[in-house]
Image (spheres, rainbow, N blue to C red):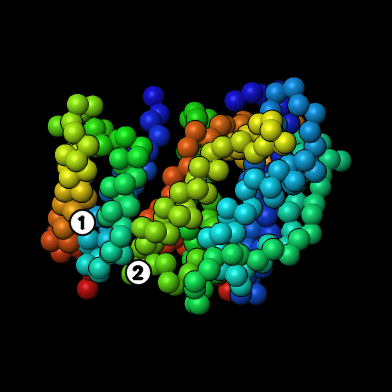
Amino acid sequence: VATDRNVYELIDEQLFASEKVKNVYYFQIGPALSLTAADLVDSYQSDFLTTLRACQHPSLVHTRIFARNLFDPAEFAEDLISLAGTLTGTTDELPPFVAAGFTLERETGATRNGKKRVAAGSEAHQDWGAWSGAFLSTFLDPIAVLLSDSLLSGVTQAFFPVIVKRILEGEKYRLPENLAEATVNGVVDAIYSSLLTTQNSRKYTVGE
Amino acid sequence: MYRKGEKQMRLFLRELEVLGRRGKPVPGDLLDFMVDYAMRRGVVDSLIPSVDFGTPVLEQEAAIKALLQRTLRRSGEDGGQSS
């Protein structure tokens, strides 16, 4: 992983069963590219969001995509959207704290592996706490491929998924604010669980 | 060197153990999906020492399916379910 390039945080905010659901990603810009946070917001929507929405119940709505440069507070971009999940052939959604779980496999030992929890699966696609094979192959496998792949800007590989190490300051962890203090790790693969997982921060009265 | 698909299959095997201990039925197409995944990624040989590049595809499929079924059944027979 290059250590001389900007790193962006991207937050995908969703509303589901009155709970605010967030997915946070980190991307490092490709070499010698002059792209911005606004380009990342566009790339995320064109390359990733359609595949993600395909596994989500229609009662979940993506409401805001926000990206910022970790090393430059002046550079940020947001897009207010209203895009629902597109999972078809389903009636009952699972609770907001039930999620499909992904692990981002790290390139080196500099950080821990990353995790992603995708909300709004459907009752029809699980049985006793395990996803059906059809759900895994049709929906989760394509998401896993994208989670470890770069986002395109046009035809250029533009934004590469990374894991960012947080810095312990006093008793709290924070993100790095400049290149010198940043530890950034590449993502070599994304693997997913065949079991339903839980995101406690999405439980009622916990988190936002 | 990191081999794509290998860790995924090892995770699937661990999760089959969990499902076996629960003693509940698994989705009917779950094992078929896992067999297909292992074949597509070409990682059967890393899970089963007796399989190598020269092993016919049908034999590889049968071997990986047997491993998955054994894992599920064995952990179920352990009686790991808590009361």
Amino acid identity at mark 1: Leu
Q: Residue at x 28, y 53 (%)?
A: B32
Q: Residue furthest bottom?
A: A91
- Tell me which chain the residue with mark 1 is part of: B
Task: Identify which amino acid the numbered label 2 is placed on.
Answer: Asp
Q: Nearer the viewer, residue A206 or A62?
A: A62
* Residue that label 1 marks: B72
Check disc 2 and report its element: helix, strand or loop: strand
**Vertical placement of A71 versus A50: above or below?**
above
Residue A127: give its label: 2
Q: Is residue A124 visible?
A: yes
Q: x and y percent of residue A57 in the render? A: 56, 68
Q: Please report the residue visible at 75 percent of the width from the left and 46 percent of the height from the top.
A: A42
Q: Compare residues A151 and A206 and report the one nearer the observer.
A: A151
Q: Position of residue B81 (x, y in %)?
A: 21, 67
Chain of the residue on which disc 2 is drawn: A
In this rendering, does residue A206 appear at all? no
Q: Quadrant of residue A56?
A: bottom right
Res. A12 mark: none
